[in-house]
């Protein structure tokens, strides 16, 4: 290991008030909230990748707070109260994003969102029967009346085949998640947060003078820097068990593809199908499609970031069957990211040992959840 200079020890590696593991949405929003709470506190984020390497720059960029089918499933599994709590957290999170960043800086597109159903969709009747109840609950959170509305007349306008019903949510939107991460990075660095990349936290130990971190630097072999901090915050989402083995986290891979621009693409908006197992949107004139995890659950419960022929074939079949029937298209990019699920769908935000906290398990909702989850964990931490 090369020796650190006196200057390096006094600057980059100086003892910190808070070290955050992970620079995805949650790590960055947490740094922002902690700085707002105490602008003087010394914060370093350690990120194992050169850029965030989990879900935050690899998702679909839906700014969403729940489709009707998803909300009814959640009400059934987690209870109505928790379901509404989650909706409120997501909705407030989306407002927070827009408070901090301009639409242009994150390619925010207030396009509206839709849930698609076939005649056979088991949940269609349920969604229709309970729409008024859902809309009343949503009104309390958003202040908007009749947010969910049947929009079957738009099916032919979008050029879909094999969908029989659509429910519209005019408040749903899309954004560019890579640009949101860049904007967050610039913001927190401007507030004095140090972000060091290519450094993986391997373990930590509490001592009387603070918490000592052992790290590895895969990109800079041999330089396994030590860090000291008063408080440690894990924002490591699907990779949390490496540092907190008891965490109720199940890593879930999500795969995505995007096409070349298609002239006059009629699809405009963010769309959900089959309880969220399929999601698609336009990105300009490109079609982005992700999901199909339900076609290979066993192999998609992994933290290995790669695409597979099973899922990619299912996605392509979906395009040909429903989205672009008879239209030629070329796929330019395929990728995957890793989400964190668990027995419960709500984020895991807690003190896990003295002065060590976690804010993880954002499921497929982290764009919207991260700002409020970060606020919650910042409130738990003493600064
Ligand atoms: C394909 C896909 C589509 C999605 N679509 C949407 C969507 O449209 N809308 C939505 O709201 N959500 C969506 N999500 C979910 C959303 O992306 C996540 O909930 C969110 O990004 C989680 O953010 P995070 O900061 O908790 O985790 P991550 O972004 O995974 O960040 C965790 C970071 O921790 C780092 N790390 C891990 N271990 C260590 C360590 N030991 N030391 C240092 N660093 C470490 C990782 O490299 C990573 O950068 C999608 C996810 C996927 C995969």
Image (cartoon, rainbow, N blue to C red):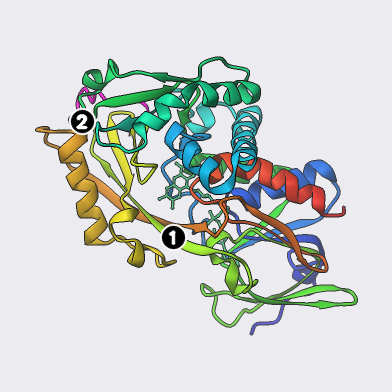
User: According to the image, label 2 marks what residue?
Assistant: 262
Front label number (1 vs 2): 1
Query: Residue at 41% of width from left, 42% of height from top?
Result: 60
Task: Please say whether residue 11 is visible from this viewpoint.
Answer: no
**Element marked by disc 1:** strand
Q: What element carries label 2?
A: loop
In the image, what residue occupies the spot 56% across and 51% down?
345
Judging depth in this view, the residue of 271 and 51 nearest the camera is 271
Residue 266, magenta (yes or no): yes
Q: Image height check: is 69 above or below 40?
A: above
Q: Where is residue 243 in the image (x, y as percent from the top left)?
A: 64, 72
- Residue stretch rendered in magenta on the structure: 263-269
Rate crowding at label 1 as few (under 14), some (14 to 19) or many (20 or more) other CA atoms within 10 Å: many
Residue behind mark 1: 252
Which residue is found at the position 74% from the left and 46% from the top?
A: 376
Report whether residue 138 is seen. Answer: yes
- Would you call the spot at circle 2 few (<14 residues within 10 Å), some (14-19), or many (20 or more)? some
Taking the image as shown, residue 309 lies to the left or right of residue 95, namely left
Residue 269 lies, with reference to residue 273, above or below; the image says above
* Vertical order, 361 against 176 (above or below): below
The percent position of residue 199, horizontal first and vertical second, equals: 60, 69
Q: Respond yes or no on whether mark 1 lies under 8 Å from ligand 1.
A: yes
Residue 36, image quadrant = top right
Please state, as top left, top right, bottom left or bottom right, where the N terminus lies in the image. bottom right
| Residue 309 falls within the magenta-colored stretch | no
């Amino acid at each position: 290991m090369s020796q650190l200079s006196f200057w390096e020890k006094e600057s980059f590696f100086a003892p910190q008030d808070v070290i955050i593991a992970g620079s995805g949405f949650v790590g960055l929003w947490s740094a922002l909230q902690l700085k707002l709470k105490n602008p003087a506190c010394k914060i370093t984020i350690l990120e194992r990748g050169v850029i965030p390497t989990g879900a935050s720059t690899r998702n679909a960029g839906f700014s969403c707070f729940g489709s009707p089918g998803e909300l009814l499933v959640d009400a059934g599994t987690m209870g109505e109260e928790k379901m509404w709590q989650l909706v409120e957290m997501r909705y407030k999170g989306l407002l927070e994003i827009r408070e901090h960043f301009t639409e242009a800086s994150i390619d925010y597109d207030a396009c509206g969102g839709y849930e698609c159903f076939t005649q056979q969709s088991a949940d269609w009747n349920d969604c229709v029967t309970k729409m008024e109840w859902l809309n009343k609950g949503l009104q309390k959170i958003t202040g908007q009346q009749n947010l969910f509305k049947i929009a079957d007349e738009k099916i032919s306008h979008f050029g879909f085949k094999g969908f029989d019903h659509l429910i519209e949510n005019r408040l749903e939107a899309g954004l560019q998640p890579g640009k949101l991460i860049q904007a967050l990075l610039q913001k927190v660095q401007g507030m004095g947060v140090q972000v060091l990349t290519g450094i993986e936290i391997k373990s930590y130990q509490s001592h009387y003078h603070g918490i000592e971190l052992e790290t590895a630097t895969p990109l800079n072999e041999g330089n396994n820097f030590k860090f000291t901090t008063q408080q440690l915050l894990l924002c490591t989402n699907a990779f949390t068990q490496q540092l907190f083995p008891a965490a109720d986290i199940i890593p879930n891979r999500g795969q995505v593809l995007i096409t070349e621009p298609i002239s006059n693409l009629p699809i405009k908006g963010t769309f959900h199908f089959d309880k969220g197992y399929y999601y698609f949107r336009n990105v300009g004139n490109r079609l982005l499609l992700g999901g199909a995890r339900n076609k290979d659950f066993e192999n998609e419960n992994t933290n290995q970031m790669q695409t597979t022929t099973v899922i990619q074939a299912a996605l392509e079949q979906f395009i040909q069957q429903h989205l672009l029937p008879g239209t030629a298209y070329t796929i330019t990019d395929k990728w995957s990211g890793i989400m964190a699920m668990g027995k419960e769908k709500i984020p895991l935000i807690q003190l896990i040992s003295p002065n060590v906290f976690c804010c993880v398990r954002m499921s497929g909702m982290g764009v919207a959840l991260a700002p409020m989850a970060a606020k919650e964990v910042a409130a738990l931490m003493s600064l």
